Image (cartoon, coloured by chain):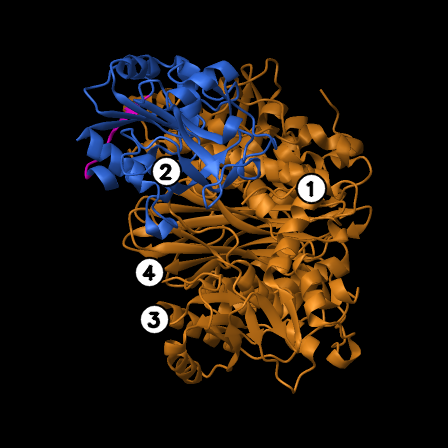
Chain colours: A orange, B blue
Amino acid sequence: MTKISPDVIAQHGIKPDEYAKILEIMGREPNLTELGIFSVMWSEHCSYKSSKKWLKTLPTKAPWVICGPGENAGIIDIGDGQAIVFKMESHNHPSFIEPYQGAATGVGGILRDVFTMGARPIANMNALRFGDPSHPKTRHLVAGVVAGIGGYGNCVGVPTVGGETNFHPSYNGNILVNAMTVGLADKDKIFYSAAAGIGNPVVYFGSKTGRDGIHGATMASAEFDEKSEEKRPTVQVGDPFTEKLLIEACLELMATDVIVAIQDMGAAGLTSSSFEMASKGGLGIEMDLDTVPMREEGMSAYEIMLSESQERMLMVLKPGPEAEAKAKAIMDKWELDFAVVGVLTDTGRMVLKRHGEVVADLPIDPLALASPEYDRPWTAPVKRPVVEAKDVELVCPAEALKTLVACPDLASKRWIYSQYDHMVMGDTVGRPGGDAALVRIHGTDKAVGITTDVTPRYVLADPYEGGRQAVAEAYRNLSAVGALPMAITDNLNFGNPEKPEIMGQIVEAIRGMGQACKELDFPVVSGNVSLYNETQGAAILPTPAVGGVGLLEDVGKSATVPFKSAGSSIVLIGETKGWLGSSLYLREICKREDGAPPPVALHRERRAGELVRQLIGDGLVQACHDVSDGGLLVAVAEMSMASEGHIGAQLDAPSNLPLHAWCFGEDQGRYILEVSDNDLASVLEEAVEHDTTVRVIGKTGGHVISVGGRAVPVHELAEANEGWLPAYMGEEMSGH
Amino acid sequence: MKAAVIVFPGSNCDRDVAVALEASMGSKPLMVWHRDTQLPDLDLIVVPGGFSYGDYLRCGAMAAHSPIMREVKAKAEKGTRVLGICNGFQILTETGLLPGVLMRNRNLKFICKDVYLRVENAGTDFTAKHKLGDVVRYPIAHAEGNYFVEPETFRAMEGQGQVAFRYCSKSGEVSDAVNPNGALSNVAGVYNDKKTVLGLMPHPERLAEDLLGGKDGKAMFDSLVEALS
């Protein structure tokens, strides 16, 4: 028996004060299995101990919210008895250590969170951050992560419909892989994880348990050091084929009436799933670990409980042999392991047996509910000065545009999304590359818009404004395709919360996000926190990624980015002041990463969104694109580059602003519309009625983008934009 | 027309092709589970895309030995039309119903995008709605679509009109620049010698509806309905 020495306790990531609490809860010294269980249950990854206090402040309710945070995923009502189930989750640490498997199992994990609740997954998204392109590991990580996401998603047959990818040196030692799944369920067929019914059988199904991934959750709750690569054995290995079987088997089983509660085995595997089900139901569980399907011989209780083998589920069945036989027949059809591993008790304790002996006996609630909650000290971030346009170097706009569209953050991500099957299931109406992906609800005229957004450089510059902006941009991207923004999931990626300045970023970003969610009626229904994204003391840019979902009642009434014809008016919605602080122009052209980020006026954001959605719904918009990274000229260029035949644009810049500030300022709350002559008067009228700033800034036509007496051919921009990533990854641009 | 779609545990385009078939046929196709051993009288059998049994071995290699494929082969030999799409094409080559093999794409990556195809034989039940040389746009989504067959066999196939589609440009030119996966002679799909079995890597069912971006693919299902009803 391993002695529980201070070393062993420290290896489990348990702090001395936490160990004191363990002794108090147990009333005795824990054995190694019990200590291991405490360590994963109380890890930052599973317990949210640093962020809980602040997460509670986020708005989570709305009349259309069926289930908010706390379950496997959030659920919203989309009418007609249907619900959308969605969540985003990080797999950052494993993806850095083993990019293919790390990313693949990230996709697998988030899929399970969604189908566990009774939903068929209908779309995957991802938000990726890599280090400096010139860093020696970046290329390898990009290749591995993209292949891993594709390898898993393509095989399970769920389309990967979009996402975002950024590069910044702060991610050199900690890449971010945030994966999101959106599923569709019947409102009256949703499954939860609260166990019920003393004496009911606890059933394990899916893949066998092996020795992989032991302590993954603990790894994900610590900083990286030079020895991190030695942690490779803690990364799990995914099997998307088994996941596909698991999806079909679960949904088939859920169509019967035998399930009482169900929970996937994610981080901390059998431990967290069993504790969560028991705790939510206020019951106990007695499990015989000898009955757990195992891949290897001689596994200890410790290993069985802490394994993070993938593609496994736990459920509570209704009593009686019929229910069990029904469930087993379905698992046999899909050739999945099935075993009754335990029984629900009224003791409120988790009792584990191995080889006939009790190897762990723990009280459930004190462990699951009384996990530490910290009010960590934090310092408010220092406000940065506003950058005036007159103090920013003026470069020829045509040259600057060409540089910007080819910079890593703005370059086309076709190389990435063409490795993802984005059309399987036959409902992808808005493919990757648009403002938001659009996926039809199968067999109906409705569709969901899906987007992922955050601008980490804004969050670093001002976490509060950056938090607001992340939510506002998701709102804007959904509105830009015509979808009504409904709710978000968030994935909060930060550095070490034990440092007051990092904790300050977390607190302020959450405050900003919460305010935007409230004012935009855009509640948070699920989320995930990933902290300790630091290597040798250097933290990532604060990256609270937002996954937004919106509803389009009539899928035929949406808008897309490409210009449709020459001779239309180009209309700018929203106010332009020429905000260059923390802009891409400043970073990519002037090599400066300073200045306060653009502020978000939420009431104007909301009005502009309402206007744009109405115009799209009324069929008055030929094309629509939100203005974000790179500013107005980049947005127009993107509409030209995406168009059939590279339709150009002639823009008239106003004389009251410096040209570079008008072209590249990143003022928020703006959209560019293509409007045909016939509809222009109605569009302008509606804008005035919505009390929204509107201005005709030019005309489509020709094959160049011209502004301020300078011009650049669209095909040159397109080549630069499409060329960067394939060239970086060492490939020729292929064919058409 | 009576049609069936074979469903392997890892099939994932079975529903998509059933939807496209129903739109052209006006009725639902029969969905047949891989463990079944019997098929009723049918006009068309579709082997859909996906990852049949995970495809951890060579794509389609395990599916070729499944119980249902013995029956599909028997039906095909009696003249029932068989359409294999993507993984279905791979399975048909593995069962020997079609000549050739599908190797890893030459860039070693999964590729999902729309491609243009030139109709190389317009006189079959699958292409009745087309003229020779028509250009159609279908999506591809595969990692192993690099078609190969021995030169001698290929010459014979060409002589018998067994090349069904070639990857081409929007205007119909066939060149290496528009070959997405390195396939021999830009071949995207092939027939058996009787033109009753077609296998192709691109997915006609994915562009069979305007809302999804076009309906070039619908012509194939309409052709089959016209020819087999």
What residue do we see at 44% from left, 85% from top?
A: A688
**Neighbours of disc 3 within 10 Å: few (<14), some (14-19), many (20+):** few
Q: Quadrant of the C terminus of chain A?
A: top right
Q: Nearer the viewer, residue B40 or A90?
A: B40
Q: Amino acid at mark 1?
A: Met
Mark 3 sits on what residue?
Answer: A618
Under circle 4, the secondary element is loop
Under circle 2, the secondary element is helix
Q: Amino acid at mark 3?
A: Asp
Residues in magenta?
B26-33
What residue do we see at 47% from left, 66% from top?
A: A624
Q: Earlier in the sequence, mark 4 or mark 3?
A: 4
What's the CA distance linking mark 4 and mark 3? 13 Å
What's the CA distance linking mark 4 and mark 2? 28 Å
Dot label at residue B222: none
Q: Amino acid at mark 4?
A: Glu
Mark 1 sits on what residue?
Answer: A729
**Neighbours of disc 4 within 10 Å: few (<14), some (14-19), many (20+):** many
Mark 4 sits on what residue?
Answer: A553
Mark 2 sits on what residue?
Answer: B204
**Neighbours of disc 2 within 10 Å: few (<14), some (14-19), many (20+):** many
Chain of the residue where label 3 is placed in the rendered structure: A
What's the CA distance linking mark 3 and mark 1? 43 Å
Q: Amino acid at mark 2?
A: Pro
Query: Marks 3 and 1: CB-CB under 8 Å?
Result: no
Q: Earlier in the sequence, mark 4 or mark 1?
A: 4
Q: Is residue A61 visible?
A: no
**Badge 4 and badge 1 both on one subunit:** yes
Q: Position of residue A168 (x, y in %)?
A: 73, 53
Q: Which quadrant holds residue A357?
A: top right
Residue positioned most to the bottom = A656
Q: Position of residue A260 (x, y in %)?
A: 36, 36
